[in-house]
Image (tube, rainbow, N blue to C red):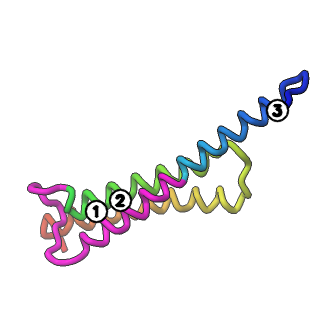
Amino acid sequence: MAENNNGSNDDEHDKHVVLLDWIQKLTTLARNVGNGMTDLGTCLYPPLHLNSNDNDNDSLLHQLNMQRGAIVALTECILDTPTELPQDVTELASKLKNAAITRYKEATDAIDAALNGEM
């Protein structure tokens, strides 16, 4: 690839590298969300461990926290894109991020209530 006097080929190459790095990060974060869904789903089968002190990785509360974190990280990656995305995509990413935070709060409140015998 020949470079012209203003270095535009190097600039284009750098832009492509940044975009490919972002895509790699995005796919890793999306994979984490998928794996987290599987882990969360297994916590919903009996016996239900809402907040286990013995093995926190198997507790519903731990898995909800992990999944919330994975979804928030994914949506933040989408919102911090190095290229322009359609407005619909960024709006949906923002809504998903806010929903993950809100649903996590609702779930943890319900688990706290159940553990304290308030249900």
- The quadrant holding residue 63 is bottom left
| Type of amino acid under label 2 | Lys
114 vs 28, left or right, is left
SS for callout 3? helix
**Distance of mark 2 from mark 3, alpha carbons?**
48 Å
Nearest to the observer: residue 107 or residue 13: 13
Whether 105 is drawn above or below 83: the answer is below
Quarter that holds the C terminus: bottom left
The amino acid on which the numbered mark 3 sits, given as a three-letter code, is: Asn
Q: Is residue 89 left or right of residue 71?
A: right
The magenta region covers: 27-56
Q: Quadrant of residue 105?
A: bottom left
| Distance in Å between CA atoms under marks 2 and 1 | 6 Å
Instruction: Determine if the magenta segment contains residue 40.
Output: yes
Mark 1 vs 3: CB contact within 8 A: no
* Mark linked to residue 9: 3
Marks 1 and 3, how far apart in space?
A: 54 Å
Residue 24 shows in this picture: yes
Q: Assess disc 2: are there few (<14), some (14-19) or many (≥20) residues with their C-alpha within 10 Å of its C-alpha.
A: some
What is the secondary structure assignment of the residue under circle 2? helix
On the image, the x and y values in percent for residue 7 come to 84, 25
State the residue position of label 2.
105
- The one nearer the camera, 9 or 108, is 9
Residue type, label 1: Asp
In this view, the residue in front, 51 or 77, is 77
Question: In this view of the protein, can residue 101 be seen by the observer?
Answer: no
Whether residue 30 is in magenta: the answer is yes
